[in-house]
Amino acid sequence: MGNTSVSPLRYLIFALIVFAFLGSEFIVMVLSTVVDGRSLDQYGTWPVNWYGALFHWSVTVLIWCLAAFFFSTWAIKRRVFSELINFRLNSKVLLYTLASVLIVILAAIVESRLTGARIPQIYSEYLGFQNMYGGNALVVTIFQNIYYIFEMVLVLIMLAFFQKAGELWFKNEKVPYGGIGIMLTWGLIHFVSHPEGALWITMWAIVPGLMYIVSNRSFYPVYALLLLGFII
């Protein structure tokens, strides 16, 4: 089970704090609404101006970067970093990563058939931004995907903390506690932030949790599942 100097309760609390950092976006929305020139009764709606969207994602990413730095530094200092995430790269990891890519593509095709959603998602969102922001659609798309990159870093940290807490409490490393944890937090919160795709995201959350276990905490296949799930 590794280093037991960190209690499972500490891991659980840290996972929930990471979730709170993800939720800080709702506070940033207040500022971005003002910057966008809208009244606060329009809080939660898409920015009217392209720079409002860029402001929102830039501030949110800054907060998330600070959170990722803090928790990574903590894990290194407590000598538990290697127990939470594995950055080793070998042929088996490459196979798992390839499997992740194929799983995402297959899932995207299934979702498209069931819901009529256009794939890849990155292109569909670009077309939407063209309608909203015209010639600024490309820069908005780039910033949105930078936002996804850092969001998935925090989701992966949260997954690792949930998984470690469950393993220490229940002494069973085969159960995807991390996937269950992000499903019940990050997944369910999408019913508030993006209700149109929330059910799919909530169900999908268990998949990276399973890959985390199968790949022995490998960063690359798990992160590929998380990030590509929002691009493809």
Image (spheres, rainbow, N blue to C red):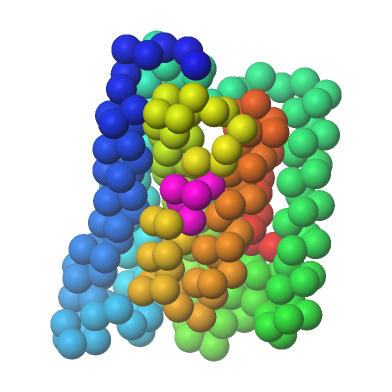
Q: Nearer the viewer, residue 200 or 193?
A: 200
Answer left or right for 111 relative to 140: right
Residue at figure coordinates x 60%, y 59% from the top left: 204
The part of the chain drawn in magenta is: 179-183
Q: Main secondary structure of the magenta part?
A: helix
Q: Quadrant of residue 124?
A: bottom right
Q: Is residue 97 visible?
A: yes
Outermost residue to the front: 170
**Of residues 168 and 81, the one drawn nearer to the viewer in this rendering:** 168
Relative height, residue 35 to residue 143 (above, below): below
Q: Residue 184 appears at what percent x and percent y?
A: 42, 57
Horizontal side of residue 116 vs 213, given as left or right: right
Give the residue displayed 45% in from the left and 78% down from the top: 195
Seen from the viewer's position, the closer of residues 102 and 68 is 102
Q: Position of residue 5 (x, y in %)?
A: 32, 12
Q: Position of residue 140 (x, y in %)?
A: 49, 68
Residue 38 on image: x %, y %: 22, 84
- Check the picture and name the quadrant holding the C terminus: bottom right
**Foreground of the two, 228 or 55:** 228
Residue shown at the point (16%, 82%) measured from the top left? 40
Residue 13: image quadrant is top left
- The mark tally for this picture is 0
Q: Is residue 70 visible?
A: no
Residue visible at 34% across and 28% down in the picture: 8
Q: Taking 201 as reference, is 33 above or below it?
A: below
Is 191 magenta? The answer is no
